[in-house]
Amino acid sequence: MPADTGRETRTPRSPAPLRAVAAIRRLFASRWQLLRQLRQAPGATTSLTVLETLAAVAPTLSALGLGWLVSRLEGIGEGDDFAWDGLVAPLVLVSAMFILQEVLAALGEVAQYAATGQIDRSIRRAVRAASLRGLSVAQLEVPAIVDDLARASDVGEGMLRSPGSAATGQLRLLFRFLAAGSATVLLSVVFSPLLAVVLLVMSLCIRALIRRQWMGLVDAWDARERYRRRSVYWTELGRIPEAGKDIRMFGLGRWVVGRRTAAFIEFLDPLWPLRRKVQIGQWPVAIVTTVSGVLALLVPSLAMRAGAIDAADLVVCLSAAFAIFQMSAMGHEAFDIEYGSGAVEALERLREMERKPASDAGAAHSGPVGFETSIRCEGVSFTYPGTTAPVIRNLDLEIKPREVIGLVGRNGVGKTTLIRLLAAVYRPDGGSILVDGVDLVDIPAEQWHARVSVVFQDFGRFPATLADNIAIGASEHLVDREGVRRAARLAGIDRWSDDLPAGLDTVLGREFDDGVDLSGGQWQSVAIARALFAAQHGRDLLVFDEPTAHLDARSEAAFFDRVTDAIDDAAIVLISHRLGTIRHADRIVMLGPDGIIEQGSHDELVEGDGEYARLFALQASQFAESASPF
Ligand SMILES: Nc1ncnc2c1ncn2[C@@H]1O[C@H](COP(=O)(O)OP(=O)(O)OP(=O)(O)O)[C@@H](O)[C@H]1O
């Protein structure tokens, strides 16, 4: 991905002219990409184009009008009262051009505002689609992709420096070039093609110089997106209630401020010398600007003194020269263009990632997806993106329909990772997972997700109603109120849901004024209900990762029976460190760093006197006082 590699990878340098040509090509490609964004706002773009066309010819007409006016003034003799009538037409033209320029500028702002808003909205939609659907979870963990998501959605404040303002700014800039071109033609016709071309070239040089200096800063800023995100993280940490608890509890205020300062310095440190360099490097711009100004003023004035042109021509020349110089000015639109095009490029990279066949979408299998005979992991290996050590190595495991499997193993051995693979959140980088003989890689992810339900340890807690938090387990059945009630009852939620202000319709989470927060155990019951609801809607495989970690002893004891009684047509995988939760599973699989250490029923494993038996004895000894360890 270019964002990840392009900025930091060193490649052998090509000769300077080739680099310049490549840079110009890149520039044109990026500008073209910007202009293509205007398709999102066809009406406003058409209006802006018409207004800018008129605005581009107005300075030339204005210069001609001024010249006309001066020529009429020259012709007026003393006491020549009626000659004043001849001034009316040029005066009307000049005044009309001045008024027109003001009106066009104001209307242009309105059209630009409308087009910018439409383009920015469409960009935001595209970023949302990429982050919510197009990109896989694995991709969302790649820092370069996270950078691009942040960069593409960073559409600036007040529509400044956004992709929309960049695209419309680019269009307006094209018309400024057109205005300068038409003034160049006028100066050539009225006075000297040589002076006209020299002034045009000098204006272009001034613009290129300023651009080169300041825009390098924008690129450098862009390349430090990751550091900017880090400093923003530390800046915003104080506003996150969860973090606020720890910050107060451990007295971390100064520490957080220190980390924020360090992150901020790390972000800006390389940018400060660059900025100083730009400021100091303004003298060539000042020199070229002064020389151009002197040329524009002196050459036509000397020509008039020599009698080559009259006063009217001089006024036209100076007005035309002024119009040419307008092109060299770098207004805010230049920064809009540069900064906004960075966002558009980031979006294009994200779209490219979405288009990649390896984007975990699955595709080749087109038949019905189900799990009738087995899910088989064959020699599965997996290494997290950006890391080198495999978390899962050469794992073989078979899951039969309606089987209940308990998955145990030490912290960090890869249990959660395995279910992420089974859920097709990640893809194995070695071996394969076969569902009834079809490789999971070939099954479209959304189809597989309609057959599987996973309650992750860090399951989603959404600021929605309790009913919706359950029903999202099978989001295609959000309105199945009876199913929600059943799942809530089976998960033991009915014991406390009636006490909530609006029962199942109570909004959960403190983000909203009327929101109610639940305890850790209550949230866990919601997640369990979510999976039970999913089971009611035809899921073939249910996975629970540490489902009883937050439950009280009574709920924990009831969990296994509740779940297995409620689900009779799906396989269940239970991950737990509490062996009491899984001891009644059909099969217990003990995972080790190099694959499965042992597997069998609870009784078989205890009899086998292996790792599981030792672990069980250890947990049981902690409950030695009671008749049963659980
Ligand atoms: N997103 C990730 N990126 C990189 N490494 C990860 C990621 N998630 C987990 N790991 C690493 O993978 C290893 C296995 O983690 P995993 O969560 O699968 O273990 P686990 O067996 O479920 O652990 P626990 O019992 O503590 O829940 C750990 O070393 C962990 O640091």
Image (spheres, rainbow, N blue to C red):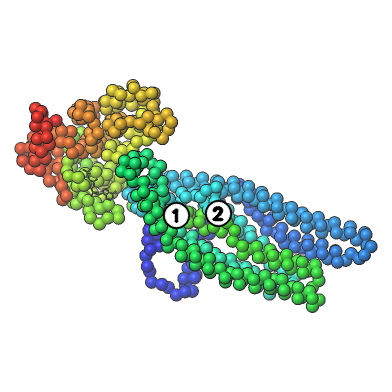
Q: Residues within 10 Å of mark 1 (few under 14, many from 20)?
A: many
- Does residue 166 appear to the left or right of 465 in the view shown? right
Q: Residue 594: where, in percent of width, then height?
A: 16, 50
Q: What residue does disc 1 label?
A: 346
Q: Is mark 1 within 8 Å of ligand 1?
A: no
Pick the front one: 258 or 498: 258
The residue located at (11%, 35%) in the rendering is 622
**Amino acid type, residue under disc 1 in the picture:** Ala
Is residue 410 something one can see in this rendering? yes
Task: Tell me the element at label 1.
Answer: helix
Distance, label 2 to label 1, CA atoms, is 15 Å
Sequence-earlier tag: 2 or 1: 2
Give whichever of 337, 236 is nearer the camera: 236
Question: In the rendered image, which residue does mark 2 sit on?
Answer: 167
User: In the picture provided, is 239 more to the left or to the right than 438?
Assistant: right
Q: Amino acid at mark 2?
A: Ala
| Depth order, front residue of 66/134 | 66
Q: Quadrant of residue 565?
A: top left
- Quarter of the image with the C terminus in it: top left
Name the residue at 82% across, 64% down. 70
